[in-house]
Image (cartoon, rainbow, N blue to C red):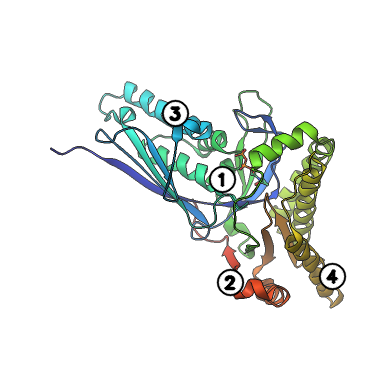
């Protein structure tokens, strides 16, 4: 007896926001209270790899994340994405009798990150982008980037930005059904190939406050977030798009650092406050400002040589142009020698292949 097995395997990279998503206006659809903008890493760097398999042979749906089983039915985000993809496949099968009826088969999903999960390194972004793309491939759905992005968003907001390479804006949209809340590429990686990211893994354990819960507490209790939503992010989005299109590193760096600080300020303004950064994170902030000031004092034509940004965790991401990357890494490893011994620096490029 031989039974058919249909399988697809894909990878999706993480993205690191330079204008942060923090706050939802609709928690079911993951509709944000502000637009955001990120840089997608190369697939060869930090990524999720997912295999989806359907077969009449499989009993029930199952998912393993980094080798550990997760109960799909208990995870609304997973069921959102899986149900939508199955429903789309079913519609295709109803319209074309020649297609195998694989939407009725049980599904097994195996997903692995090559980096710490839930440590504020965008694991859910890569995970849901990858799940969406792998299911679309398995079910042979004809979806464009905007449609894929809208579905990935229902799994995890930031996932909608990982379906495209380079510099990606998630436009918050206005519609209640979320159909205009999706990601759009601002520029390809190749547009600014000198840009590099250095990730300083300060701590790779799971964070105490998940992003989903943290942002709900912020929206419910922080007066400062209203200022951020109305007066800070809209201008930052426009200025950042211009900085990227003009490859203006000074503007890119200042907007990035200010937005990271603004995001962590609204976390501190949440009641009770949320602290994602720790003493090492703050030491990195100071080191970056000192380094930039020293370079400027030595006659650098640039105001900033390196920029920091911190997500919902203590780990730093530094943006730096290639010409300065070795020097910055050298200084960081002298300032934080213990970290160098533990080999915590990872250096990533953006100028490789697209998703
Ligand atoms: C971002 N973060 O823009 C911001 C910066 C964390 C800090 O997007 O609830 O995991 O799944 O929509 O996407 C993390 O939030 O939240 C995040 P959900 P998500 O990258």
The disc, 4 or 2, on the residue closer to the chain's N-terminal end is 4
Contact between labelled residues 1 and 2, with CB atoms less than 8 Å apart: no
* Snapshot quadrant of residue 31: top right
Q: Nearer the viewer, mark 4 or mark 3?
A: 3
In the image, 329 versus 167, the foreground residue is 329
What residue is pinned by disc 2?
343
Q: Residues within 10 Å of mark 1 (few under 14, many from 20)?
A: many
Give the image location of residue 324, x and y in percent: 69, 72
* SS state under label 3: helix
Q: CA distance from mark 2 to mark 3?
A: 41 Å
Q: Nearer the viewer, mark 2 or mark 3?
A: 2
The disc, 3 or 1, on the residue closer to the chain's N-terminal end is 3
Q: Residues within 10 Å of mark 2 (few under 14, many from 20)?
A: few
Left or right of 215 in this view: 350 = left
Q: Dividing the image into 4 quarters, which one contains the N terminus? A: top left
Q: CA distance from mark 4 to mark 2?
A: 27 Å
Residue at figure coordinates x 76%, y 46% from the top left: 263
Q: CA distance from mark 3 to mark 1?
A: 19 Å
Q: Which disc is residue 217 wearing?
A: none
* SS state under label 4: helix
Q: Nearer the viewer, mark 4 or mark 2?
A: 2
Q: Nearer the viewer, mark 2 or mark 1?
A: 2
Q: Which disc is residue 293 wearing?
A: 4
């Amino acid at each position: 007896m031989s039974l058919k097995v249909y399988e697809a395997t894909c990878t999706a990279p993480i993205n690191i926001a330079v204008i942060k998503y923090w706050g939802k206006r609709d928690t079911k659809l993951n509709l944000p209270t502000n637009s955001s903008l990120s840089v997608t890493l190369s697939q060869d760097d930090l990524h999720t790899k997912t295999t989806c398999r359907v077969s009449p042979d499989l009993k029930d749906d199952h998912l393993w994340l980094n080798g550990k089983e997760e109960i799909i039915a208990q995870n609304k985000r997973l069921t959102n994405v899986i149900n939508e993809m199955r429903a789309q496949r079913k519609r295709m099968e109803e319209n074309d009798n020649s297609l195998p009826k694989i939407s009725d088969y049980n599904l097994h999903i195996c997903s692995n990150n090559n980096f710490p999960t839930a440590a504020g390194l965008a694991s859910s972004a890569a995970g849901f982008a990858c799940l969406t793309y792998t299911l679309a491939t398995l079910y042979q759905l004809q979806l464009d980037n905007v449609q894929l992005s809208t579905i990935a968003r229902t799994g995890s907001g930031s996932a909608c930005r990982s379906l495209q390479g380079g510099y990606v804006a998630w436009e918050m949209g206005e519609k209640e059904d979320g159909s205009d809340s999706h990601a759009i590429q601002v520029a390809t990686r190749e547009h600014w190939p000198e840009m590099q990211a250095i990730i300083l893994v300060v701590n790779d354990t799971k964070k105490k406050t998940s992003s989903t819960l943290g942002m709900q507490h912020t929206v419910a209790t922080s007066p400062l977030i209203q200022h951020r939503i109305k007066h800070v992010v809209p201008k930052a989005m426009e200025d950042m798009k211009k900085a990227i299109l003009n490859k203006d590193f000074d503007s890119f760096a200042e907007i990035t650092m200010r937005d990271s600080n603004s995001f962590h300020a609204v976390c501190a303004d949440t009641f009770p406050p949320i602290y994602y950064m720790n003493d090492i994170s703050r030491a990195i902030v100071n080191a970056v400002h000192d380094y930039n000031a020293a370079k400027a004092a030595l006659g650098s034509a640039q105001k900033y040589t390196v920029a920091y940004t911190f997500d919902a965790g203590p780990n730093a991401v530094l943006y730096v142009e290639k010409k300065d990357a070795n020097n910055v890494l050298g200084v960081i490893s002298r300032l934080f020698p213990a970290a160098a011994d533990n080999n915590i620096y990872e250096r990533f490029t953006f100028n490789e292949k697209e998703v």
